């Protein structure tokens, strides 16, 4: 008569590990699906916003053309504005303090979400 039934213990432990692995896979799939859904929504919102900016730019260019009584100066001014904006953002991108601030905010948001998930 065996006091300890190691075979049964090992089988139970193996089944436990398989179940935990299956649960982990399921949780990862759920998180991935949530991330894809959020990304899709952000992309749709970005696309709508880009259309808004495009048509606003055309409107402003046309208004400036009428104001300056020109066929192209208004569009050139809008294009110059976007070029200056691009140059400013390009040089800000190299600013490490701004990158560090953004990284810290992203990490804070991730920690808040993680803590909120663990509180549930």
Image (cartoon, rainbow, N blue to C red):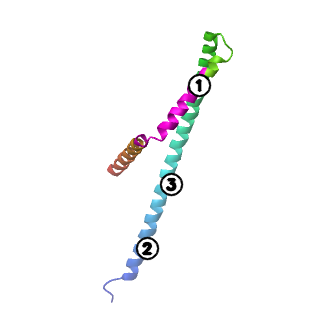
Question: Could you say which disc has been placed on residue 52 in the image?
Answer: none
Q: In this rendered view, identify the residue nearer to me: 14 or 66.
A: 66
Mark 2–mark 1 Cα distance, whole angstroms, equals 66 Å
Q: In this rendered view, identify the residue nearer to me: 105 or 15.
A: 105
Few, some or many residues within 10 Å of mark 2 (<14, 14–19, 20+): few
User: Which sits earlier in the primary sequence, circle 2 or circle 3?
Assistant: 2
User: Which sits earlier in the primary sequence, circle 2 or circle 1?
Assistant: 2
Q: In this rendered view, identify the residue nearer to me: 52 or 79.
A: 79
Few, some or many residues within 10 Å of mark 3 (<14, 14–19, 20+): few
Residue in the picture at 49% in, 52% down: 30
Q: Position of residue 45 (x, y in %)?
A: 54, 34
Q: Position of residue 86 (x, y in %)?
A: 55, 33
Query: In terms of secondary structure, what is the magenta stretch mainly?
Result: helix
Mark 2–mark 3 Cα distance, whole angstroms, equals 23 Å
Disc 2 designates what residue? 14
Is the Cβ of the residue at disc 1 closer than 8 Å to that at disc 3? no
Question: Could you say which disc has been placed on residue 29 in the image?
Answer: 3
Residue in the picture at 63% in, 16% down: 62
| Corner quadrant of residue 71 | top right
**Residue 78 seen by the camera:** yes
Mark 1–mark 3 Cα distance, whole angstroms, equals 46 Å
View extreme (bottom): residue: 1
52 sits to left or right of 114: right
* Position above or below: 13 against 59: below
Mark 2 secondary-structure assignment: helix
User: Which sits earlier in the primary sequence, circle 1 or circle 3?
Assistant: 3
Disc 1 designates what residue? 80
Q: Position of residue 105 (x, y in %)?
A: 38, 42
């Amino acid at each position: 008569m065996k006091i300890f039934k190691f075979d049964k213990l090992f089988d139970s432990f193996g089944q436990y590990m398989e179940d935990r692995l299956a649960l982990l896979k399921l949780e990862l799939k759920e998180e991935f699906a949530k991330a894809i859904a959020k990304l899709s929504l952000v992309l749709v919102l970005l696309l709508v916003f880009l259309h808004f900016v495009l048509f606003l730019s055309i409107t402003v260019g046309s208004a400036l053309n009428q104001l300056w009584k020109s066929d192209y100066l208004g569009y050139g001014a809008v294009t110059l504005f976007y070029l200056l904006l691009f140059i400013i953002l390009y040089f800000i991108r190299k600013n490490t303090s701004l990158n560090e601030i953004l990284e810290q905010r992203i990490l804070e948001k991730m920690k808040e979400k993680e803590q909120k998930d663990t509180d549930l």
